[in-house]
């Protein structure tokens, strides 16, 4: 018994001594010894029992053996805090997960790159010549990327640059996978794409799938009836009478006269909706559709961010050959030679055409899966009625174009408040819910704004497209007020009516306006280039270029303009008045634009609670910037516009009187507390 007692005392002393021993010496050795076989088994267990006097008063210490650790970890004062911390952690994770899901659920859809800023359209042959041959080229565009970025542009849109003969401004393509030598090489294009992306910009390009050049390899194979290419184009038998072709029906080309042309190689007529050098592809042939999809994929792999699909309403024609109806039924059929003298019920917007366009969308969607690389799709629908134009947006559950290009403002020839308002109202009222609008005031096939309206309207039209909801689109030179050139003699086959808006970009007052160092340019520069050019306007505080930059910067930085409601207040023969407002922001932008003669606008008659004096945020007359106006009577000269700003909590789109006069594309509200957008409006 004395020997057993001595062993217990020895172990107890070792345990007490461990309170000052922070190492791992002896403790585990002692406790993990084989028990003395001569000792009763219950004694060995009792040594580590929780009620053993030897453990009383001992605190946890570093290096304690696991048997001792278990004695302490089971005690309430250690177990309870541990369990509390565990469940707090679980609750925190659940709360954060729920909050994340809630934020995602109430967050509005983010604006994509093609919605977030302006698009700048370039006719490449006229923008900048880098190799002194008198023609603009791809390297010339790359040289001017800093200028484009200074306009706060988000997207560059380059029109057709494919290998093409000089017919119809290169819309008859000879090879869809080649760069025309006038514009450079494929390496130049690849360098341009990389440089555009390095600037944080995006690139969209034209694509004309309806027809090719008659020099295209497909057409040469088709006219010889070679394999699958035999029916790549639309061929029909036609009669020849003394050297005169008698076409299968009365269908007309856009440029006038019959749309059928006899081919002596195949001994048949082929169909062309444009020039005879531009035969229409047969989109009833699935092989043709597959060829076009492969071309789309080719350019997407090159890095382009989207396409503008041109002339898509012409993709399909009726397979029967019935004559189209005359507009004037009393007119002698033999005298019907102009395109507008027929209704084109069998040659445009046929059943199945939108299915083909949607297949383009599906092809592009395959390349939109990479985060941040959504591929944009626009369609050109010029000449369509507003209801047919809206069909290019697609159906509620079937995506088609991101938007059809809106050129209705480009077609206005006389400015007035009523005509401008009708274009705005027509688009906003007919646009499908949740879709995105766009606005353009010029283009390569339209007379330039300054030549249509006058130079006093440059600033107000730019102010209009930057303050309407949607994406503003600028044709090169519109930011400085370029005008059409005068009629000139050409050796090339062009429609003179669409030639005049394609003159070289006016960069400075040097030779050829800084466009080219060549002795001769493909088109002459306008005679006003000494005063209307980028360099001159950069140095003036009251220039069109300076206001354009201010407008694009305001558009980029103000949620009211990028996400806000549009509410129109009044229009007449002179003026258009509308607001931009957003839930959660107690400020309103009020646009007052005068397109007619000098007029006085009383804003108090339109908005009863508007302050007597409001601040001018921007004005076409830059001397007014930052000053105030009296809302009882604002005097505006011809072509003058104001962006006014005032504070209010009584937003118009909540008022019954304005409910039918307010529109929003992507509804969102702003939380000033969290500094986020949400959809719980």
Image (cartoon, grey):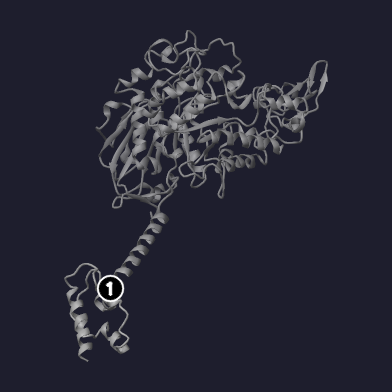
Q: Is residue 599 above or below residue 395?
A: above
Q: Residue at x 27, y 86 (%)?
A: 46
Q: Is residue 100 above or below residue 89?
A: above
Q: Is residue 200 above or below residue 542?
A: below
Residue 593, image quadrant: top left
Q: Is residue 636 above or below residue 497?
A: below
Image coordinates of residue 153 in percent, x first then y, are 41, 31
- In this orientation, which residue lies closer to the viewer: 8 or 332? 8
- In this orientation, which residue lies closer to the viewer: 174 or 194? 194
Observer able to see residue 42: yes
Q: Which residue is mark 1?
A: 28
Q: Residue at x 30, y 76 (%)?
A: 32
Image coordinates of residue 508 in percent, x first then y, are 38, 15
Residue 72, image quadrant: bottom left
Image coordinates of residue 65 in percent, x first then y, are 28, 73
Residue 88, image quadrant: bottom left
Observer able to see residue 393: no
- Residue 244 in the figure: left or right of residue 137: right
Q: Quadrant of the C terminus?
A: bottom left
Q: Secondary structure at mark 1?
A: helix
Image coordinates of residue 89 in percent, x first then y, are 32, 65
Q: Residue at x 63, y 24 (%)?
A: 172
- In this orientation, which residue lies closer to the viewer: 275 or 144? 144
- In this orientation, which residue lies closer to the viewer: 265 or 632? 265
- Residue 45 in the figure: left or right of residue 501: left
The residue furthest bottom is: 1
Q: Residue at x 39, y 11 (%)?
A: 510
Dot 1 crowding, Cα within 10 Å, few <14, some 14–19, many 20+:
some
Label count reads 1
Q: Quadrant of the N terminus?
A: bottom left
């Amino acid at each position: 018994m004395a020997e057993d007692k001595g062993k217990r005392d020895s172990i107890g002393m070792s345990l007490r001594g461990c309170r000052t021993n922070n190492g791992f010496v002896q403790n585990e050795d002692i406790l993990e010894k084989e028990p003395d076989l001569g000792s009763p088994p219950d004694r060995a267990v009792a040594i580590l029992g929780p009620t053993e006097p030897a453990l009383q008063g001992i605190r946890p210490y570093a290096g304690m053996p696991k048997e001792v650790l278990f004695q302490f970890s089971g005690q309430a004062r250690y177990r309870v805090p541990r369990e509390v911390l565990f469940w707090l952690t679980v609750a925190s994770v659940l709360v954060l997960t729920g909050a994340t899901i809630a934020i995602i659920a109430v967050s509005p859809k983010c604006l994509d790159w093609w919605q977030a800023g302006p698009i700048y359209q370039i006719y490449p042959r006229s923008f900048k010549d880098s190799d002194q041959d008198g023609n603009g080229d791809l390297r010339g565009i790359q040289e001017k990327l800093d200028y484009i970025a200074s306009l706060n542009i988000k997207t560059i849109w380059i029109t057709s640059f494919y290998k093409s003969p000089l017919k119809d401004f290169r819309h008859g393509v000879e090879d869809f996978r080649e760069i025309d030598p006038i514009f450079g090489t494929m390496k130049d294009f690849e360098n341009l794409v990389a440089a555009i992306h390095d600037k944080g910009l995006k690139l969209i390009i034209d694509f004309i799938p309806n027809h090719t050049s008659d020099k295209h390899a497909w057409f040469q194979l088709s006219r010889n009836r070679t394999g699958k290419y035999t029916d790549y184009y639309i061929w029909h038998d036609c009669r020849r009478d003394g050297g005169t072709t008698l076409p299968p029906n009365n269908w007309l080309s856009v440029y006038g006269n019959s749309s059928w042309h006899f081919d002596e190689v195949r001994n048949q007529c082929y169909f062309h909706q444009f020039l005879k050098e531009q035969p229409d592809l047969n989109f009833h042939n699935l092989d043709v559709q597959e060829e076009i999809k492969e071309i789309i994929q080719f350019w997407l792999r090159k890095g382009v961010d989207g396409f503008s699909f041109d002339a898509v309403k012409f993709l399909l024609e009726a397979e029967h050959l019935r004559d189209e109806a005359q507009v004037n039924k009393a007119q002698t059929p033999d005298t019907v030679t102009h395109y507008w003298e027929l209704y084109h019920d069998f040659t445009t917007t046929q059943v199945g055409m939108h299915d083909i366009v949607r297949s383009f969308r599906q092809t592009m969607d395959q390349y939109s899966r990479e985060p941040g690389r959504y591929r944009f799709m626009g369609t050109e629908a010029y000449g369509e009625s507003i209801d047919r134009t809206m069909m290019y947006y697609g159906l509620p559950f079937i995506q088609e174009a991101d938007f059809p290009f809106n050129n209705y403002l480009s077609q206005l020839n006389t400015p007035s408040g009523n005509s401008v308002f009708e274009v705005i109202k027509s688009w906003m009222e007919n646009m499908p819910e949740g879709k995105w609008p766009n606005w353009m005031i010029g283009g390569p096939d339209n007379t330039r704004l300054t030549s249509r309206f006058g130079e006093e309207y440059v600033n107000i039209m730019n102010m209009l497209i930057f303050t309407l909801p949607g994406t503003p689109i600028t044709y090169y030179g519109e930011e400085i007020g370029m005008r059409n050139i005068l009629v000139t003699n050409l050796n090339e086959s062009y429609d003179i009516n669409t030639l005049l808006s394609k003159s070289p970009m006016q960069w400075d007052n040097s030779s050829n306006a800084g466009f080219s160092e060549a002795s001769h340019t493909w088109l002459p520069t306008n005679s006003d280039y000494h005063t209307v050019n980028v360099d001159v306007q950069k140095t003036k505080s009251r220039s069109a270029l300076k206001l354009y930059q201010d407008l694009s910067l305001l558009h980029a930085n103000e949620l009211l303009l990028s996400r806000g409601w549009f509410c129109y207040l009044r229009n007449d023969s002179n003026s258009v008045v509308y607001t931009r407002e957003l839930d959660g922001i107690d400020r309103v932008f009020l646009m007052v634009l005068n397109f007619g003669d000098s007029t006085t606008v009383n804003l108090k008659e339109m908005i009863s609670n508007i302050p007597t004096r409001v601040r001018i945020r921007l004005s076409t007359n830059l001397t007014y910037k930052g000053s105030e106006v009296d809302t009882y009577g604002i005097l505006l000269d011809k072509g003058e516009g104001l962006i006014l700003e005032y504070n209010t909590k009584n937003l118009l789109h909540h008022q019954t009187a304005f409910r039918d006069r307010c529109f929003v594309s992507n509804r969102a509200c702003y939380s000033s507390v969290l500094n986020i957008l949400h959809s719980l409006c």
